[in-house]
Amino acid sequence: MRLRAFLPLPLLMALLVPAPTALAQTPGAAPPAADTTHKYQNPTGVSAPVKKPFFQSKGFRAAVVPAVLIGYGASTINGHGLYSSYQVKADIRRTFGTYRNHVDDYLQFAPYFEIGGVLLAGIESRNDRVNLGLIVLKSELIMLSSVYVVKKLAGVQRPDSSDRFSFPSGHTAQAFLAASIVHTEFRDKSQWYGIGAYTIATSVAAFRMINNKHWESDVVAGAGFGILSAHLAYLSHRNRWGRKSIGRDVSWMPLWSPGGSTGLSVTWRPNR
């Protein structure tokens, strides 16, 4: 339906006829000279991007928290620091005695199960599932390689004297990496997803010390390595398929035939 069928004629004319400008010339007056002083400064008419201060840059915000954690962890190795790893171990042994468990071996991956559960519940993540999988893969590669190299170089002995690969904690790095991905992907939906994931990761760090597998310095630095690995993966990732969802258009269904054979049916519905 056309707009003019609803507008009164005077209003329609007011919208169509341009308003007189303040620089309307009187008859016979010469037009003002064009200002050519800044003619070539911005030929496209697009305003120049404003460079953010260093402390507001993405790189600084991504690195500041991990740097603090890694730095604090390194400062408390052995008997160093205001509350050293030796002091923390003594307090833990005094509280928990010889108690041990293996829950941390499984709990380190719990935030990934949280991602799966939230997606199956129909909650949309920040990235589509293909790009989310790529980010997880890249984060894991960064974390595993960096933690392994530092373990070899540091050569810190574990509290139980089992080997010299104590610093930093790989379990804690794994848990905080996954928690950081949960927080980034679902913080726009609810902050509680990230809070739950970071609570799980903190529990992993605590159990690593209770089980006498790691020092305080190991778990604090491990948390920093995990968060940093996730942040680096996001900073370096480029969505190869644009902003349109691909992973959400993929579905699969198990198949079974009377002859006894089984299979999997995969369907892709592009939304272009």
Image (cartoon, helix red, strand yellow):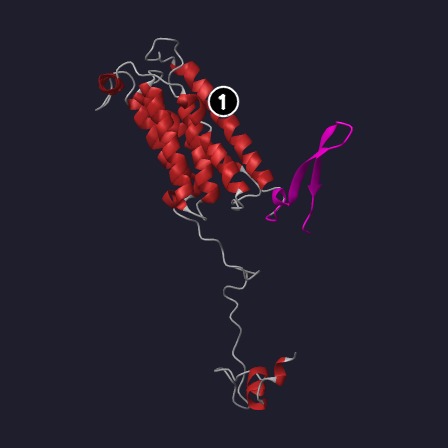
Specify whether residue 251 is painted magenta. yes
Count of labels in the image: 1
Is residue 251 placed above or below 168 in the rendered structure? below
Q: Nearer the viewer, residue 120 or 137?
A: 120
Region of the chain picked out in magenta, as a range: 243-272
Q: Is residue 162 left or right of residue 144?
A: left
Specify whether residue 15 is painted magenta. no
How many other residues sit within 10 Å of disc 1, few (<14), some (14-19) or many (≥20)?
Answer: few
Q: Secondary structure at mark 1?
A: helix
The residue at the point 54 percent across, 46 percent down is 122
Farthest-out residue, front: 258
Farthest-out residue, right: 259
Q: Position of residue 160 (x, y in %)?
A: 34, 10
Q: Residue at label 1?
A: 145
Q: Is residue 220 left or right of residue 86?
A: right
The residue at the point 41 percent across, 28 percent down is 225
The residue at the point 50 percent across, 65 percent down is 37
Question: Which of the 4 image quadrants contains residue 168?
Answer: top left
Q: Position of residue 63 (x, y in %)?
A: 40, 35
Q: Is residue 185 left or right of residue 7?
A: left
Q: Amino acid at mark 1?
A: Ser
Q: Report the quarter where the N terminus lies.
A: bottom right
Question: Which of the 4 image quadrants contains residue 96?
Answer: top left
Q: Nearer the viewer, residue 215 or 36?
A: 215
